[in-house]
Amino acid sequence: MITTATAPGKLIVLGEHAVVYGKPAVALAIDKRFACTIQESDATYLNGNIADFDSNPHIRKILEMHGLRNIAITTESAIPPSSGLGSSAALSVALTAAVRKHLKKEIDENDISMEAFEAEYTAQGRASPIDTSCSTHGKGVALNCPKDVGKHLWTISKCSESWDVSDIPVPRMTFVVGYTGIRAATGPLVEKVKKFREHSRFASDIIDEIGNITLEGMKAMNKNDIEELGRIMTQDHKLLSILGVSCKELNKYVDASLAYSYGAKLTGSGGGGSMIALTERPDLVCEAIRLRGGQPFVVRTGVDGVSVDP
Ligand code: PMV
């Protein structure tokens, strides 16, 4: 039997890094998907080679959780790896769904998001469930948002942190992504912020401030106040830069986009990866990013989450 599942990438509108410490965050699913096909085999393969689990601890974790061996996994992705757009989480979500279908287990969003989060947590060392929840549910997802902003989906707890995951309405918005082409793994950036926070009261204040403005941004988005949301995104970029997770390319594309946008910021873990601009003039923003050496593209947000071939 051959089973295929696909899951979307995401962009984080507000709250990355701070969300690891239980602060609020907002993410939207994007129209770039990760596809995972599995079938029984004589050993465990990944894209035609014997699976290297040291490079793919999330895959090992998912197979272990389900006691599955001897499976050939084939992947195909439209999400650039280590780009801040959630390719690893989309893999974990798509593989979890494919494995559950293969084993004739229930295809339940809550179970898939929990298991995919376990896998990402193992791979990343420390993580929040923002990426895996958004990739599973799709549409718009907020973590730890006020009750009147979203509809509660599930709660995930790990160590001393807990996250209430909610579905939120997604207003009509146009986002341009500016990809730096620089691959930056999430784990080391999360670790960098952790060390900074442990050694500096200033860093934990910045994380609190990201949490505060993210709440304001959620309310603005809920009221369809795109101008205010953009202003808060730009403010968030400044705070993330102070935390040390931006880089000169991201700052350059953010600066260049601001002339034609409501707001712009890095998205995801940073250090390279991608930035986003919220705009009504996507062509001008794309041109500004391209002129500075970035790879721009317009994304559609609020798309469907994980899906398994019948
Ligand atoms: O760069 P990405 O897509 O892996 O986004 C990670 C978001 C962080 O907040 C930096 C980490 C996390 O697990 O929440």
Image: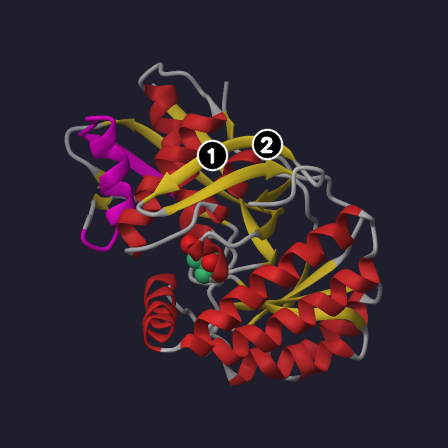
68, 309: nearer the viewer: 68
Residue 110 in the image: above or below residue 166: above
User: Which quadrant contains ligand 1?
Assistant: bottom left
The three-letter code of the residue at mark 2 reads His
The three-letter code of the residue at mark 1 reads Thr
Q: Position of residue 158 (x, y in %)?
A: 34, 43
Q: Is mark 1 within 8 Å of ligand 1?
A: no
Verify CB contact (< 8 Å) between mark 1 and mark 2: yes
Residue that appears at 64% across and 79% down: 253
Is residue 6 rendered to the left or right of residue 234? left
Residue 120 in the image: above or below residue 1: below
The stretch of residues the image draws in magenta is 54-75
Q: Disc 1 on helix, strand or loop?
A: strand
Instruction: Identify the disc placed on residue 152.
Output: 2
> What is the distance, in whole Å, between disc 1 and disc 2 at their CAs?
8 Å
Q: Residue 139 lies in magenta, yes or no?
A: no
Residue that appears at 19% across and 26% down: 67
Residue that appears at 33% across and 77% down: 199
Q: Is residue 299 visible?
A: no
Q: Disc 2 on helix, strand or loop?
A: strand
Circle 1 residue: 155
